[in-house]
């Protein structure tokens, strides 16, 4: 598999900027994951999120991009560059022309439409630049905010995968949404 290119130029709209993660953002990333809501829906481990976990993420995301597996981008405020969260295309399968999208936001970024904008930007880029035919958005059944983002972006709910994944100290169901390239034209 070949490396996934980075969007060039960075993606932006409505005050939201999607850009590559910076090597020195481990402390800011760790601080963002101190938010109980980010931890509740994003961090699958029952263990605390440590600075070492943030450093490992920053190292691993570059390797995963080069391996063609995923593209992780920081979500930031246009102009100031303030870190607002993260968005990713992961489980990228260019042969099948599909990927999944995930995202999280800091408390300060919520309620501004930043998640909706980030998902629209990266999904649109994936359809155009990677020639994807399908993007999946999954979340826990209790993550109502993520389900609303999916709806606002035009994703269609397909169903629930029961006991789908290990999460925290147990198993979790997963709600599956999808967006097809043709859905954008409808």
Image (cartoon, grey):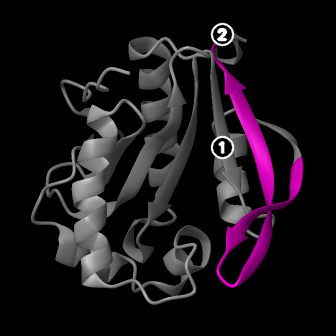
Vertical comparison of 59 with 159: above or below? below
SS category of the residue bearing label 1: strand
Crowd around label 2: few <14 · some 14–19 · many ≥20 (10 Å) = few
At 50% across and 18% down in the image, what residue appears? Answer: 94
23, above or below 28, in the image: above
> Which label was assigned to residue 36?
none
Image location of residue 56, percent across then percent down = 27, 66
Q: Are marks 2 and 1 in contact (CB under 8 Å)?
A: no
- In percent of width and height, residue 87 lies at 42, 49
> Can residue 17 be seen in the rendering of this structure?
no
In the image: residue 74, left or right of residue 181: left
Q: Is residue 55 visible?
A: yes
| Residue closer to the observer: 79 or 11 | 11
Q: Earlier in the sequence, mark 2 or mark 1?
A: 1
**Left or right of 65 in this view: 106:** right
Q: Check the image and report above or below for 22 versus 158.
A: below
Left or right: residue 57 versus residue 127 is left
Give the secondary structure at mark 2.
helix
Residue bearing the label numbered 1: 137
Residue that mark 2 sits on: 185
Q: Position of residue 69 (x, y in %)?
A: 42, 35
Quadrant of res 134: top right
Q: Is residue 144 left or right of residue 30?
A: right
Main SS of residues in magenta: strand
Position of the C terminus by quadrant: top right
The residue range painted magenta reads 160-181
Mark 1: few/some/many CA within 10 Å (<14, 14-19, 20+): many
The quarter of the rendered structure image containing the N terminus is top left
């Amino acid at each position: 598999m070949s490396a996934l290119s980075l969007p060039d130029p960075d993606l932006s709209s409505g005050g939201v900027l999607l850009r590559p993660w910076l090597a020195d953002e481990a402390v800011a990333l760790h601080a963002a994951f101190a938010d109980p809501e980010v931890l509740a829906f994003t961090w699958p481990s029952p263990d605390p999120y440590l600075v070492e976990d943030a450093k490992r993420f920053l190292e691993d995301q570059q390797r995963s991009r080069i391996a063609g597996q995923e593209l992780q981008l920081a979500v930031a405020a246009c102009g100031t560059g303030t870190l607002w969260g993260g968005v990713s295309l992961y489980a990228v399968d260019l042969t099948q022309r599909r990927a999944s999208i995930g995202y999280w936001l800091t408390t300060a970024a919520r309620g501004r439409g930043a998640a909706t904008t980030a998902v629209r930007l990266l999904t649109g880029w994936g359809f155009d630049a990677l020639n994807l035919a399908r993007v999946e958005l999954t979340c826990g059944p209790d993550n109502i905010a993520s389900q609303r983002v999916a709806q606002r972006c035009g994703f269609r709910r397909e169903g629930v995968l029961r006991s789908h994944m290990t999460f925290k100290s147990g198993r979790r169901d997963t709600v599956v949404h999808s967006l097809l390239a043709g859905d954008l034209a409808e």
